[in-house]
Amino acid sequence: MEDKLEILQKKIAFQSAICLRTCPPDSMIFDSDPEPKVKRHINTCPLCLERLESAGEAAAWKIIGSALKAPAPVSVEKVLPGEIRRVAGRMAGWGRLPAGPGRAAQAGELKYFNPPAVLVLYELDKNYFRVMQTHDDPILMGPDDVFLGDGLGFAEPWNTYPLRSDEFGDLYGTLGADLLNEAIKAEKSKFKEIDPHSVLFAFRTLELETGSFMAARSVSRLINHLETENKGVVLPFSTPKELGSFMARTRPEVVLSQQGKNVYEIIARTDFPELHMALAAESEPGWRVAIFIVSRDIGLDVIAAFYKITLMQPTPDGLLVTGRMRKADYSPNEVWGWWASKEGIYSQASQCAIDPESGIFRVVFPGIGEDIISKGKATLLFISDGRL
């Protein structure tokens, strides 16, 4: 049981984390004519408002502190496992949070994301690395986190994703082999549940939002890079009639949807009892549930997959939806998506990609603008080839 002082320390540390992750840089805050979204941020962020009001004092302290500041990070081009690096500055940007419980900020809020520091775990493929996000304040450490040493903070095994070698910035430090192996081992473990009403839960939600934002483009680039080797999961049936015959033999209690342009959409729109049972047993807020099909040689298994949508971002190609599927017994190889309007019209996503190891996904719905986000919802379907 935490005492009042410890809770207060965590609340203060969490406020600092919010500023570190989501407050725009000085170049935006102190602009003589800031953009409307920067103005909105300043009006709702007491930390940035205080930065503006104490600008003169801050400038004086900057001159005094220039001789006292810690050594600058080193710029090293080649990326190696065990390094702690800042994500490249160009990966920063604005993102909008979706509606739903368990958010670190108000649903629908337009939020700026700064690049975090990450621990490079191992190479995934040529020019791609698995990374684990880190945070510098040990006060916010929780179960399963890995302490990296004084000045380096801790690593977050529950928050890993892929990055390309040109998406890394400066080098802050390098771990020894034993500590790196400890972090890699922690990534594979089953994580302890966190009290959804705690400061730690809110902090981890913020960290996952930041990681998902940084990973969204990398996941797409990585999947596109591997497409020549991965042709996708082939289901044992290709027509609605074949699917209907299989379900009639194996799951006669399930009434397949009569709507859908292909077997994937029919499965996604079917009301499987697995979804209701999974939701009834779930205690942690913020998770949504979708069908997860595991392809077999002679059929398929249907299980429930929990996922969170972390960002919904209008782009020139359509509405970009990113999130993360919770770890399951099988690795997801594909994600399919449809945008369902309130009138029941389903529009298939034009771009879908998922990282099998972290479960981070990105889906793009063409023709869906910011003005109609509230008039529909994303429906997802996850698929595995049966590998653990």
Image: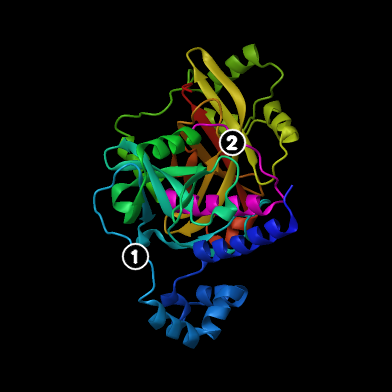
**Is 200 colored magenta in this rendering?**
yes
Q: Residue at x 45, y 62 (%)?
A: 114
Which one is earlier in the sequence, the residue at label 1 or at label 2? 1
Q: Which residue is mark 2?
A: 191
- Locate residue 283, reporting x and y percent: 73, 39
Residue under label 1:
71
Numbered tag placed on residue 352 in the rendering: none
- Would you say 126 lies left or right of 275 here? left
Looking at the picture, the colour scheme in use is: rainbow
- Find residue 230 and report its image quarter: top left
Give the number of the mark in front: 1 or 2: 1
Number of labelled discs? 2
Q: Residue at x 68, y 27 (%)?
A: 274
- Judging depth in this view, the residue of 184 and 324 nearest the camera is 184
Q: Position of residue 184 (x, y in %)?
A: 43, 35
- Residue 141 in sight from this viewpoint: yes
The boundaries of the magenta stretch are 188-215
Indicate the amino acid at tag 2: Phe
